[in-house]
Image (cartoon, rainbow, N blue to C red):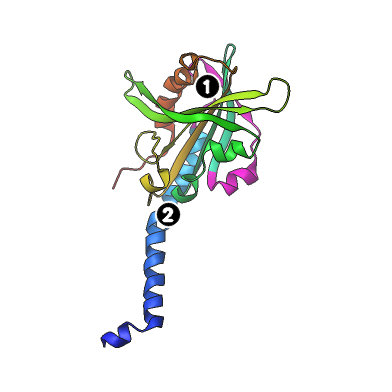
Amino acid sequence: MMQWFLRPPVVALLVLVVTGLVHGLWTGRWHTDADLVAAADSVQNVPLTLGDWQGQLQPSDEDAFRQAGALGYWTRRYQQDQEAVTVILMCGRSGPLSVHTPRDCYGGAGYEMVGMPTRQVIQDKENGEGGEFWTARFRKTEGVGGSHLRISWAWKATESWQAPDVPRWTFRGKAFLYKLYLIREVVEDEDPDADQTKTFLLQMLPTLKKSLFSPPAS
């Protein structure tokens, strides 16, 4: 009996089945689509007005979003007086969305990351909402004076916004995943303490908490 069980075709079949189960759990493929669809649809619930910031819808590259695994998404430019932040919000399966970072996306557009990203903790004590974001400066040397961006990014499943070292591992098996990018044009020598992204996030995070789908944790 044991000899039959260990025959190469049987072993190969068992390996195939186990591999498929592990991959399904890792990517969240075994979850029902109901939660995923509800989460993807909920990105449209986020209002264009966030406190003193007024948003305007921007064109989106649908092919690029699909390649990133996003099912629900938008790109907006929020402005307050002379300050402006471009925001990209997307939602999809955790496997594909956990992989790509701004280094991948903006690297293809000719930007390079300056130094290593650092974590920025955002905490709204009044509303009890916050999170942790990666932030880094990117530069593009082409053109007169080049171009410089400050980009912050994070992911969210059912918890707060997070900036893990290995997001694919942290969010393995989740039914869905949100990803948030915030992009600001900056001067080359801008003081990091002058970054208005944190001010904007303090306005935005409580609204995101109310707007985005978040089923009870099992």
Label 2 neighbour load within 10 Å: few <14, some 14-19, many 20+: many
Whether 61 is drawn above or below 186: the answer is below
In the rendered structure, which segment of residues is drawn in magenta? 46-71
Does the magenta-highlighted stretch encompass residue 95? no
Quarter-of-image position of residue 76:
top right
- Answer whether residue 82 is visible to the viewer in this image: yes
- The location of residue 29, given as percent across then percent down, is 43, 57
Identity of the residue furthest to the top in this view: 81
- The location of residue 45, given as percent across then percent down, is 49, 33
Residue at screen point 43% across, 37% down: 155
The quadrant the N terminus occupies is: bottom left
- The location of residue 111, given as percent across then percent down, is 62, 32
- The location of residue 50, given as percent across then percent down, is 49, 21
Going by the image, does 190 lie left or right of 218?
A: right
Identity of the residue furthest to the right in this view: 144
**Residue 49 badge:** 1
Residue at screen point 42% across, 54% down: 27
Q: Which residue is mark 2?
A: 27
Assign a secondary structure to mark 1.
Answer: strand
Residue at screen point 39% across, 39% down: 165
Residue type, label 1: Thr
Assign a secondary structure to mark 2.
Answer: helix
Out of 116 and 55, give the one closest to the viewer.
Answer: 116
Label 1 neighbour load within 10 Å: few <14, some 14-19, many 20+: some
